[in-house]
Image (cartoon, rainbow, N blue to C red):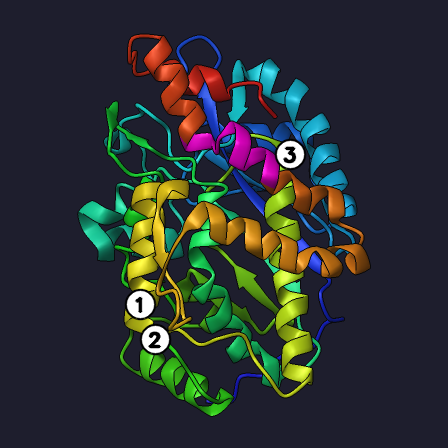
Amino acid sequence: MNIAFTHSPQSTLGVEWELHLVDQATLELAPVAAELVALVGPDEGQPIRKEYLPCCIEVVSQPRRRVADAIADIAAHLDRLRPAAAELGVTLMGAGSHPFGDPAGTKPYPIPRYLEVAERNQWWGRQMTICGTHVHVGVSDRAKVLPMMWTYARFYPHILALTAASPFWYGEDTGYASQRTMMFQQLCTNGLPYYFSEWAEFEACVDDLVRCGIIEHVDELRWDVRPSPKFGTVENRIPDSAPTLAEIGCQAALTQCLGQYFSDSLDDGDSPDYLPPWLVRENKWRAARYGLEAEIITPQPGRLLLPLREAIERLVEHLMPYAETLDCVAELSFASELLRHGASYERQRHVAAQAGWAPDAPAAANRGAL
């Protein structure tokens, strides 16, 4: 199978942010996405979209060169959404999962591709009351796509922990920083990408999946990091949905700077240190379980294990020259604020503890935080 890749200017970016809709009075999930999208009205490119479930929407930026411009797009869409949401008696919540909503009470939109996901995945397909953030990074040369994809996966813990925002599930503290990560990987086309050394191997994989009836199109691969041939990007789908624009900006800056770092390394005939798939998988689990308190496995023989907080500090320092070139120093620097003051999963637990672990406390904390 031939899969054409539409090249994009290197390190341009686009942000897709999924948000829960919750009732202003009860904080329960509110299945009013269709009504909300209709109220804000159609727009070219559909930057405000319905999602898999009617209690979620997605807000999308234009392709941009600067993180600040992508976040400005998102902010402008929020300005349109807030009065419409208030008219419907709902508010927007950025989080990886709703802390006490009952997944059984939600059903996907009755369109064929969504119904197929629900039917095929059964119980797991009915649990997808989760929201994430996707950051596309433009790639100028198809030869860079697959090594970039796998190297993003190598930095999974750094990318996830800063926006981990789903410690609660159906009113219970799961013990995980990102329950969304654990839920999302259960679907048959989700999870970590495979390691491919050349584009033909990726094409052969897609061909096998199509011939076996697993997918119909490459877009149905929902890996944590995936090529997006239509847009000429590598799409980072690792992060949870975060509750603030500052956190989304930080995640976008980290993704963009990593992409430029990978690209420059490949141009120089080098690549960031390789980590085997079985260790990448272990690091993913550690980040989802322990968040910023994880101890991750590194490719460095001299120091096999490293506290994730220290690893993030080192990475931010390493990427700062790229942030200066890409004009996202402020956004990347916000990672240090999150290390000091806590990622969303930590803040949710703190609010819940102060409220005596009332199950609706984290939702109340996230409401209106945008």
Asked if one can make out residue 65 in the rendered structure from this viewpoint, the answer is no
**Tag 2 near tag 1, CB within 8 Å:** yes
> Which range of residues does the magenta coloring cover?
336-345
Relative to 160, does residue 86 appear above or below in the rendering?
A: above
| Residue drawn at 36 percent across, 56 percent down | 296
> Is residue 260 magenta-colored?
no
Asked if one can make out residue 282 in the rendered structure from this viewpoint, the answer is yes
Q: Label 2: which residue?
A: 276
Q: Is residue 155 left or right of residue 104?
A: right
Residue 136: horizontal and vertical position, in percent?
61, 60
Residue 306: horizontal and vertical position, in percent?
39, 55
Relative to 42, does residue 7 appear above or below in the rendering?
A: below
Q: Label 3: which residue?
A: 245
Relative to 84, does residue 263 appear above or below in the rendering?
A: below
Foreground: disc 2 or disc 3: 2
Q: Is residue 229 left or right of residue 213?
A: right
**Tag 2 near tag 3, CB within 8 Å:** no
Mark 1 or mark 3: which comes first in sequence? 3
Q: Quadrant of the N terminus?
A: bottom left
The quadrant where residue 261 appears? bottom right
Residue 269: horizontal and vertical position, in percent?
63, 88
Q: Label 1: which residue?
A: 279
Q: Amino acid at mark 2?
A: Pro
| CA–CA distance in space, label 2 to label 3 | 34 Å
**Residue in front for this viewpoint, 169 or 128:** 169
Foreground: disc 1 or disc 3: 1
Q: Amino acid at mark 3?
A: Leu
